[in-house]
Amino acid sequence: MGLHTIIKKQRQKEKEMRFLMLGLDNAGKTTIIKKLLNEDISQISPTLGFNIKTLTSFEPYKLNIWDVGGQRTLRSYWRNYFERTDAVIWVVDATDRARMSDCRDELRGLLQEERLSGATLLVFANKADVEGCLSPGEIKDALGLEDVRTHTWKILRCSAVTGEGLEGGVRVRLLALPHSGMTMGISPLAEAVFSCTSIPYTSMFSSTLLRIWKLNDSRRRSRSPFQEPHLRHNIPMKRVCRVNIPMR
């Protein structure tokens, strides 16, 4: 496999994003996904397990959205879906004032999970088309979002029935991802290596690139590679003849 093929496959992979959609039962999670896919929403049944849907309308991204049931008996299984999550979409029923404290407690527990430490957070204040619903500001206060320091978050009003705010909210989260943009998530270290066109293509160089990509694809995506102790080596940020990284 040539170097060009390796780079091309890696960049295609990094265009795939994993969004985890969670919230209490009857918040409208499944309806939101169906609306984004332009599917029929006239008959929606409670999600007893999980659904996986792929959105291709947000080019150049391919979004894999995991919709997990929100019933109390299912919430303990949420942790089975945390791996490799780029963003969490927390759906709130803006008309359900009675369970707002329950919603806050579940969200706080979620944000303490180490495997979600690099994920951004989008809070959808759903059912905004219903008269008398809570405003995004009221929901923000009820959930204590101002106290969240561990994640980048955004709250937006939406309606799964009318489609208001859905696509815009997803795009907002895409732009907030650490690896969004024209470089499609290639780390600064990898970009420096790619620009070194005079580096001879050797098995050591290929292995080094693969190590860099594996790190960039892990849960440390949101961190700079220069923060990793084992990557602190002397790699000039210009044209060089070799990469002096000892293999382990």
Image (tube, helix red, strand yellow):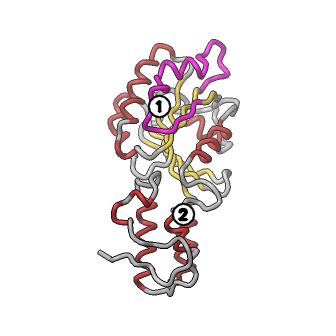
Residue marked by disc 1: 23
Q: Residue 141 vs residue 162: left or right?
A: left
Q: Name the foreground residue: 116 vs 158.
A: 116
Q: Is residue 40 visible?
A: no
Q: Earlier in the sequence, mark 2 or mark 1?
A: 1
Q: Residue at x 49, y 26 (%)?
A: 146
Q: Nearer the viewer, residue 187 or 94?
A: 187
- Res. 228 in view: yes
Mark sitting on residue 156: none
Tell me: residue 55, above or below residue 9. Answer: above
Q: Which residues are magenta?
A: 126-155
* Picture quarter with the C terminus: bottom left
Q: Secondary structure at mark 1?
A: strand
Nearest to the observer: residue 38 or residue 169? 169
Q: Is residue 83 left or right of residue 61?
A: left
Indicate the amino acid at tag 1: Gly
Question: Of the residues shown, which amino acid type is indicated by label 2?
Answer: Ile
- Where residue 178 appears, as percent x and y from the top left, is 54, 51
Callout 2–callout 1 Cβ contact below 8 Å:
no
Circle 2: is it few (<14), some (14-19), or many (20+) Cα within 10 Å? many
Magenta-colored stretch includes residue 129: yes
Residue 71 drawn in magenta: no
State whether residue 134 is above or below residue 203: above
Q: Report the Cα–Cα distance between label 2 and label 1.
A: 32 Å
**Residue of label 2:** 186
